Image: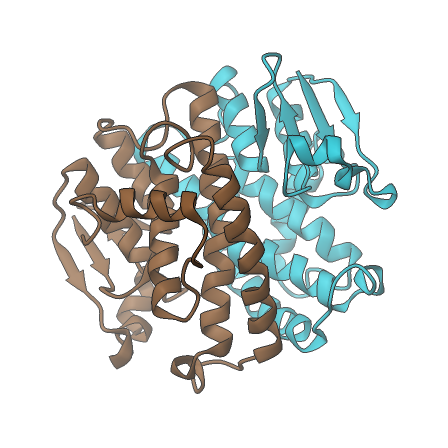
Chain colours: A cyan, B brown
Amino acid sequence: MKLYDLKAGMNPRRVRIFLAEKGIEVPIAPIDMMKGENQTPEFLKLNPLGTLPVLELDDGTILTESVAICRYFEFSKPEPNLFGHGGVEQARVEMWNRRLELELMRPLAEQFRHLSPFWKDRLTQIPEYGEAQRTRLGQVMEWLDRELATRPYMAGERYTIADITAQCAFVLGKNTGAPIPDGLHNLKRWWDLVSSRPTARA
Amino acid sequence: MKLYDLKAGMNPRRVRIFLAEKGIEVPIAPIDMMKGENQTPEFLKLNPLGTLPVLELDDGTILTESVAICRYFEFSKPEPNLFGHGGVEQARVEMWNRRLELELMRPLAEQFRHLSPFWKDRLTQIPEYGEAQRTRLGQVMEWLDRELATRPYMAGERYTIADITAQCAFVLGKNTGAPIPDGLHNLKRWWDLVSSRPTARA
């Protein structure tokens, strides 16, 4: 088994934290995106989309998409549980994981792609679109702050994959000019809680 | 139990097809977005995001996000299975469902939102962004056509939630100026296969 990884990437980090929470060690194959190693013919044979992470199983099966990879490991090592127990909790965790991907992670990634000099020569930036995402993020963070007034973690009383998604999104936000604003005390309390876990720097 | 539904919506359709495949009947509460029924204080109490579908359980539990709602029903009625059996198949279905959401459904929805007169007064349209999405879609459909040369369905040998996601995306594409191009024979063969299922018009 081999995990193709990108140290600084938001999505690869989700899988590394998930594995650390599970106590699973997987051999890592680091891929250097700056050198174009994710666009070589060999890599595109593994994943035609050129995205990371990619998990290669011993029989050659290839799995891409962070949450799909995490789900594979949830099945092979069910505890500690990170996707929920039973129908209602599993659905609630999935709901929050998706809300955080769609409402938080995606606009954070898009404002970075469309506003940062890093991406200038790598895609056709549309600054107006990046600004719209940043404006939207302000409302999203206020909404999350209200939600977290009622519970310690994103999906309820305990830490789940929904928290991992959110914390990886906020790491990107912190590094790209879209930090958690002062005054959002519930969100700040949640951030201190999750970012102090021993797995947070996996 | 009650399913708040939007007849013409891409995501509500995913849940209706999923329920029809499972043979599950749920009382439907239609919501008229044109009349703003998804923005009333009552509705926003159910789902602060104002999106549809929303599932309300008998104990008052609220579930949003199509795939979370589908996962709830997969747990309560496991057969026919639509999310995969075992770790590897579950991960493969999740991988394809996500690839189709991110690479196909999202650009299809975005080109509609940023190019169609329907959305003109409902959001700040950025036509340049819409056009970029439409250009990207051409490459995505060619990639899917190559993938479908090797298997009948999106995630493998049988129909799964990944096919439901793709068919609902293509319904939107057909209605908004981004149809499957002529010449993509594998994709067309897949479309004929899934759109002729008795559940396709659920």
Residue B105 lies, with reference to residue A45, above or below; the image says below
Q: Position of residue B71 (x, y in %)?
A: 33, 37
- Return the x and y of residue B101 as percentages of the image width and height: 47, 50
* Lateral position of residue A53 relative to residue A39, left or right: left
Quadrant containing the C terminus of chain A in the rendered view: top right
Q: Position of residue A11 (x, y in %)?
A: 66, 41
Is B45 drawn above or below residue B143 in the view shown?
below
Figure check: A136 above or below A199: below
Residue extending furthest toward the top:
A58
Residue at 33% x, 45% y: name it: B164
Q: Identify which residue, B99 or B76, lies in the foreground.
A: B99
**Residue A186 visible in the displayed image:** no
Question: Can residue A65 be seen?
Answer: yes
Q: Is residue B74 above or below residue A175?
A: above
Quadrant showing the N terminus of chain A: top right
Is A48 positioned to the left or the right of B55 in the image? right
Report whether A139 appears left or right of B181: right
